[in-house]
Image (cartoon, grey):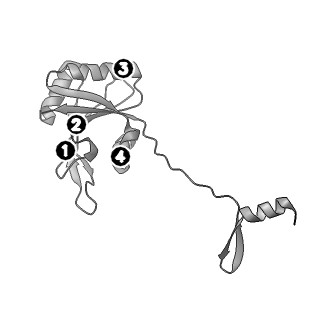
Amino acid sequence: MHYLQQNFIQRVSNCTFTGAKVMILNRKFLKFEIDLDFVLIAVTTSLKDYRICYLINKYLNFNFTKTEDLEAEVNAGEPLATFSQYQYNPKSARSTFYFIANKGSDGYLLPEMRKADYFLMTKNNIDENELDNLVSSLNKVAEIVAAVKIDPKKIKSREKSLILAQIFEV
């Protein structure tokens, strides 16, 4: 037998499928990656949601208004938990801002970020300078302990990041 034929036969896997031999030459893997095209800012404060939104509205000239609570599954098989949610849609901007509580009726929206009390979210229609200015302005509000940019791709609970991404699909 020729060397190339011998080498080829050694590389090919034979398996039985409904009585017929099938040769598997290449295995291809499909890698599924979620497009998380939003900006997430974690906000830590001891204030209630309505109070911190009032202060953000006052100092940053936003206009957050209360919307229907976000419902999400915290624990599999249990009823949906509700999370307080506010929305601001500036007329001059191309994006909508959401302010969502991390602590809900039955647990945390993002359990790996328990120190974050709220999340401010917006689509990626905001450039890095605007984002840095926004985070800096939030940190200047005395009642906010910390405001930090979070990379949505590094969120461990992928299902939760999908819930956050779905907010923009409505």
Label 1: how many Cα within 10 Å (few below 14, some 14–19, many 20+): many
Q: Earlier in the sequence, mark 2 or mark 3?
A: 2
Q: Residue at x 84, y 60 (%)?
A: 3
Secondary structure category for the residue under label 1? loop
- Mark 1 or 4: in front is 4
Label 3: how many Cα within 10 Å (few below 14, some 14–19, many 20+): few
Numbered circle sitting on residue 156: 4
Q: Give the spatial CA distance, label 1 vs label 4.
A: 17 Å
Asked whether the viewer can see residue 61, the reply is: no
Q: Quadrant of residue 55?
A: top left
Numbered circle sitting on residue 118: 2
Amino acid type for the residue under numbered disc 3: Glu
Viewer-proximal residue, 86 or 130? 130
Point out the residue furthest to the right here.
2
Residue behind mark 1: 103
Residue behind mark 3: 130
